[in-house]
Image: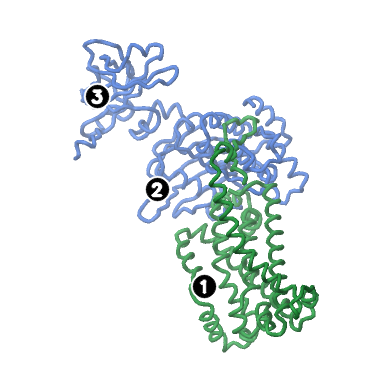
């Protein structure tokens, strides 16, 4: 089933699209012993918006999601849905649809009964439950599997039933806790498209937790990058990639190479060229600096007198990633795969800066130097 | 023996059913090497004899009259035995009460420990082993001594049920513990709550139906224990079935043996029934995870 088919199906459902509610996380703080899982974490999600919480494991993203769901309580702070603080409301009364990382279908119920579970608790009549469950299973492309038990479905199918089940209760907010991480690559891609198509069609406010930057960038309207319980940056995927607000974001989102640079006035010197600094003025930085270079910021050319040496090559399909040894650092850059045979391992190359400005950060002392 | 079937997720994901690979049936490839099969047969035979010979001997003895000839009289006389019906009635009431208390106490406790106090599981394991480690005679003398000031309970047969709850605890705990261990309990509970179910609805609709096998085996073990326990009932001076069998063995040993055989048969039938019910259910719902 293609995304277009899905949209058609979604349009064909008789019920009105679920209206998205605004969601606000206000100064959420939670400590576990000496560790702060969340530290004054705030986030506003607009009605119908899809926001991804992205960060390394332990950054607090799952804790934040579980607070919205009502499975964890903040020490301080509020969760507001439609302007109303729901921090004290138990999970079962919050009307949040949730899809979990692990398969969460009730093993004793068929796909249809799983989807109808929430409707049954809402005392909907059997006929209504049945019709709505079938509609939703149809929507996620499982119309032929309604009578199957979870163990008879593949992992991807189970997650789609879980999605239908979460949508069946017409939730005010949809919460997705790494729903794709247990699936293999191909299924993950398909389900990812499907989630996005449904979310846009139903216009439902969605919070999505992931540690996979590709997922976050491809799905979300805005991405909230988290680190140590705090917000590092909230921005659209394009903004996040092009204008990371910190070294952490630059290195966590997309590929970056750190190259030590010297200052020259308001510029830094990279490959003997003066390059402007992106974001905060250079005067704000104290001490030695590193430049954070994206693969596309740099161009390489084979040259016998070049100052870099190709150390490693990774074929990525249309492009090939080169790791070039330069001074004491390794720099990642991409060349077209058709061109890649000019860059055998050991080839000497010259490096040239093509970006007009560059992000800088305080120099990181290599671990070896600390010993 | 059926080879294990493993569902394979091939990422088919748009409509194609997942399929299963069945492991090759053992034996065909090992044609000439027959000796392990003989060995297995021998072990099975010895084990079968170990169980069947005493049962056969008891059955043979049960179906004899006083003169030592074959007779069905001991079977027909069972119900006419003085005190028999009362003993069965008492054992039955005790088993129902024991089972009810056991499940009401243990099911929420074990679920709570799994959900909220997973580190407490080791402590629970040790605690629930105590009734096996403490000799029954010590346990019942302690209970009788402790209950003596409270006339209403010390004079009631249901004091025995309270003791049986403790005796059955190791078996019930282990059944439930392994049943819950096979479920992703936390996710099931959270999924159910996010869909609008309170704690009771979650327990009733999402957890207990998936603990069916564990609950059945816990129940069977409890019933078997209550119908077979002798020491406590004897010391508490209540005539349950085992006590009645012991008391009557001097008057008519043939009938008493027939009663024992009948209970063996009844228990076996109950077990078979429960197992087959569970199997039918599993065929519908598939193997529990």
* Chain ID of residue with mark 3: A
In the rendered image of this protein, does residue B202 appear above or below residue A9?
below
Q: Nearer the viewer, residue B1 or A2?
A: B1
Q: CA distance from mark 1 to mark 2?
A: 48 Å
Chain letter for blue, please: A
In the rendered image of this protein, does residue A270 appear above or below residue A181?
above
The residue beneath circle 3 is A266
Mark linked to residue B196: none
Q: Quadrant of residue B70?
A: bottom right
- The crowd level at tag 2 (other Cα within 10 Å; few <14, some 14-19, many 20+) is many
Q: Is residue B86 rendered to the left or right of residue A287?
A: right
Q: Quadrant of residue A17?
A: top right
In the rendered image of this protein, does residue A229 appear above or below residue A138?
below
Q: Quadrant of residue B65?
A: bottom right
Q: CA distance from mark 3 to mark 2?
A: 35 Å
Secondary structure at badge 2 equals strand
Coloration of the structure image: by chain
Mark linked to residue B131: 1
Q: Residue at x 48, y 33 (%)?
A: A216
Q: Colour of chain B?
A: green
Q: Residue at x 50, y 29 (%)?
A: A218
* Chain ID of residue with mark 1: B
Place of residue B259 in the rendered image (x, y in percent of width and height, measured from the top left): 72, 74
Mark linked to residue A39: 2
């Amino acid at each position: 089933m293609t995304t277009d088919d899905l949209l058609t199906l979604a349009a064909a459902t008789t019920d009105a699209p679920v209206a998205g509610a605004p969601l606000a996380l206000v100064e959420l703080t939670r400590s576990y012993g000496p560790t702060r899982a969340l530290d004054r974490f705030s986030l506003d999600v607009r009605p119908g918006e899809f926001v991804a919480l992205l960060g390394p494991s332990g950054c607090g993203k799952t804790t934040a999601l579980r607070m919205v769901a009502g499975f964890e309580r903040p020490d301080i702070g509020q969760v507001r849905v439609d302007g109303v603080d729901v921090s004290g409301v138990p999970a079962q009364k919050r009307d949040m649809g949730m899809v979990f990382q692990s398969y969460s279908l009730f093993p004793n119920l068929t796909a249809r009964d799983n989807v109808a579970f929430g409707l049954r608790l809402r005392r909907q009549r059997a006929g209504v439950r049945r019709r709505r469950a079938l509609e939703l299973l149809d929507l996620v492309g499982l119309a032929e599997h309604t009578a199957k038990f979870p163990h008879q479905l593949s992992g991807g199918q189970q997650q789609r039933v879980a999605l239908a089940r979460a949508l069946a209760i017409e939730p005010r907010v949809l919460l997705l806790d790494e729903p794709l991480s247990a699936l293999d690559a191909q299924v993950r891609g398909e389900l990812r498209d499907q989630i996005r198509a449904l979310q846009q069609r139903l216009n439902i406010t969605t919070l999505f937790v992931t540690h996979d930057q590709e997922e976050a960038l491809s799905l979300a309207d805005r991405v909230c990058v988290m680190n140590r319980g705090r917000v590092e940056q909230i921005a659209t995927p394009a903004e996040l990639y092009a204008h990371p607000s910190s070294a952490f974001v630059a290195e966590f989102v997309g590929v970056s190479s750190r190259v030590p640079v010297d200052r020259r006035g308001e510029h830094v010197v990279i490959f003997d060229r003066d390059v402007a600094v992106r974001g905060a003025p250079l005067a704000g930085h104290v001490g030695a600096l590193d430049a954070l270079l994206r693969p596309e910021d740099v161009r390489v050319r084979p040259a016998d007198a070049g100052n870099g040496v190709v150390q490693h090559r990774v074929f990525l399909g249309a492009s090939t990633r080169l790791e070039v040894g330069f001074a004491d650092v390794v720099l990642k850059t991409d060349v077209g795969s058709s061109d890649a045979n000019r860059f055998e391992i050991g080839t000497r190359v010259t490096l040239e800066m093509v970006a007009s400005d560059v992000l800088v950060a305080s120099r990181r002392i290599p671990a070896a130097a600390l010993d | 023996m059926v080879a294990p079937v493993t569902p394979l997720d091939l990422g088919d994901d748009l409509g194609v059913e997942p399929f299963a690979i069945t492991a090759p049936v053992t034996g065909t490839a090992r044609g000439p090497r027959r000796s392990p099969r003989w060995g297995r047969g021998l072990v099975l035979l010895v084990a079968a004899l170990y169980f069947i010979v005493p049962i056969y001997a008891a059955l043979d003895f049960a179906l004899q009259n006083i003169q030592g000839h074959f007779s069905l009289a001991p079977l027909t006389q069972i119900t006419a035995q003085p005190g028999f019906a009362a003993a069965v009635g008492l054992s039955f009431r005790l088993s129902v009460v024991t089972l009810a208390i056991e499940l009401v106490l243990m099911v929420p406790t074990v679920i709570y420990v799994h959900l909220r106090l997973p580190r407490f599981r080791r402590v629970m394991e040790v605690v629930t082993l105590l009734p096996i480690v403490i000799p029954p005679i010590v346990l019942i003398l302690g209970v009788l001594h402790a209950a003596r000031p409270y006339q209403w309970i010390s004079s009631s047969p249901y004091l025995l049920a309270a003791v049986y709850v403790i005796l059955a605890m190791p078996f019930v705990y282990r059944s439930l513990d392994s049943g819950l261990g096979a479920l992703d309990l936390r996710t099931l509970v959270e999924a159910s709550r996010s869909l609008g179910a309170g704690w009771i609805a979650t327990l009733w609709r999402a957890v207990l139906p998936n603990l069916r096998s564990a609950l059945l085996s816990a129940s069977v073990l409890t019933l078997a224990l209550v119908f077979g326990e002798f020491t406590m009932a004897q010391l508490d001076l209540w005539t349950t079935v085992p006590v009645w069998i012991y008391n009557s063995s001097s008057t008519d040993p043939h009938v008493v043996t027939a009663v024992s055989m009948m209970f063996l048969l009844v228990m076996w039938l109950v077990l078979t029934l429960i197992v087959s019910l569970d199997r039918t259910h599993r065929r519908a719902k598939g193997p529990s995870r």
